[in-house]
Image (cartoon, rainbow, N blue to C red):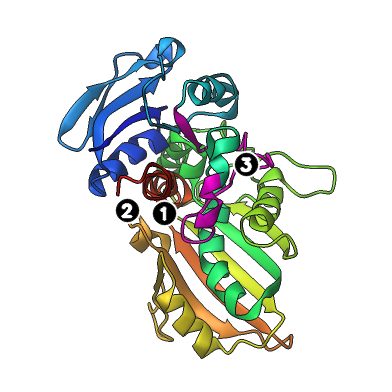
Amino acid sequence: MGYRVVVVGATGNVGREMLNILAERQFPTDEVAVLASRKSLGTEVTFGEKTLKTQDLDTFDFTGWDMALFAVGSDATKIYAPKAAKAGCVVIDNSSLYRYDADVPLIVPEVNPEAIHGYAKKNIIANPNCSTAQMVVALKPLHDRAKIKRVVVSTYQSVSGSGKEAIDELWEQTKAIYNPTKDVPPKVYPKQIAFNVIPHIDVFLDDGSTKEEWKMVAETKKIIDKSIKVTATCVRVPVFVGHSESINIETEDFLDEDEARDILREAPGVMVIDKREDGGYVTPVECAGDFATFISRIRQDSTIDNGLNLWCVSDNLRKGAALNAVQIAELLGREVFKKG
């Protein structure tokens, strides 16, 4: 017996990826409904070997449906997620709306699966920010062994994190570099993204950080341990898919790089590719389309007593969004609905 599942925002990048992953992982479904805004009504999307036609989110009745995977912005989520939850359909939300709500669990299944039972307070579960999701998968097994005190992270985030328009902007600007008669001014980003990097993701806050950087701090504390100190610099780079992170870790107890490598090799959701030779590490090109969070360049930081450096790469549309949402659905099935 399977579940009746709704995918909200099914025509977007993340919504389509959710459908792909539900099919790839053979998530047990009896029925799948795909919803979109009225402007996309009737658009066809693929679910495995099936072709599904989108229905109107505004008029859809969530009664009798088990789970709804939301891949729309916070504004739409604020309207429709409470309706779904009130109708008895558990919402798994990819927006930032509920991540910092004390009554809504923020879950990465490899890291804090025990938090799943907190869903009952509002019938809503939050999916973390893409840059946070892959980082905490790497941090948690190391934290369990040596207790992490402080994290310094710099991100190299692909344009797919900003949606289809950003992917198009990078593509068009790249082509325009080789065609001097064509000018493609920035629209999605404040500066040219092609052949450039932009140290600015989301809005600026009063302390000079950006909201993306603040999210990494707040979400890491909520998911792993509120005592961890995190400082982040988030950068947009001209890569289509796949976020990369340079992570510096300070632990309470000494952790040898070889032991850290062994711990990460055994950690759920992690793939260690760490050879000290040309090409002995993973880049976004290799991780695109994969489920794993890849870890490379594991090494001691000799400038502090208990320090480690590592390189972390993952497909942001998968682990950073759609895959994590589906993994939450799987966890919900095992621990709450008890169907497998």
Which label is found at residue 99? 3
Spot occupied by residue 73 in the image (x, y as percentages of width and height): 54, 29
**Depth check, front residue: 296 or 80:** 80
Q: Residue 76: horizontal and vertical position, in percent?
A: 55, 22
Give the answer, above or below, for where 258 lies relative to 282: below
Dot 2: within a 10 Å radius of its alpha carbon, few (fewer than 14), some, or many (20 or more) residues?
some
Determine whether the residue tagged by mark 1 lies in a helix, strand or loop.
Answer: loop
Q: Which residues are magenta?
A: 89-117
User: For the residue labelled by badge 2, is the local secondary structure a helix, a strand or a loop?
Assistant: loop
Instruction: Inspect this view and state whether residue 193 appears.
Output: no
N-term mark: 1 or 3: 3
Q: Amino acid at mark 3?
A: Arg
- Rate crowding at label 1 as few (under 14), some (14 to 19) or many (20 or more) other CA atoms within 10 Å: many
Q: Residue at x 46, y 76 (%)?
A: 264
Query: Mark 1 belongs to which amino acid?
Result: Asp
Residue that numbered label 1 is attached to: 315
| Corner quadrant of residue 273 | bottom left
Q: Is residue 48 above or below residue 295?
A: above
Q: In the image shown, does 32 or 160 lie closer to the viewer?
A: 32
Q: Residues within 10 Å of mark 3 (few under 14, many from 20)?
A: many
Asked if residue 228 is positioned above or below residue 51 in the image, the reply reads: below
Q: Are marks 2 and 1 in contact (CB under 8 Å)?
A: yes
Q: Residue at x 51, y 88 (%)?
A: 259
* Residue 289: numbered disc: 2
- Which residue is rendered at x = 41% and y = 41% of the image? 171
Task: From the viewer's side, name the closer residue of 47 and 224.
Answer: 224
Q: CA distance from mark 2 to mark 3?
A: 26 Å
Quadrant into which the N terminus falls: top left
Look at the image and say whether residue 137 sits in the magenta stretch. Answer: no
The residue under label 2 is which amino acid type?
Gly
Find residue 256 and report its horizontal and vertical position in percent.
58, 90
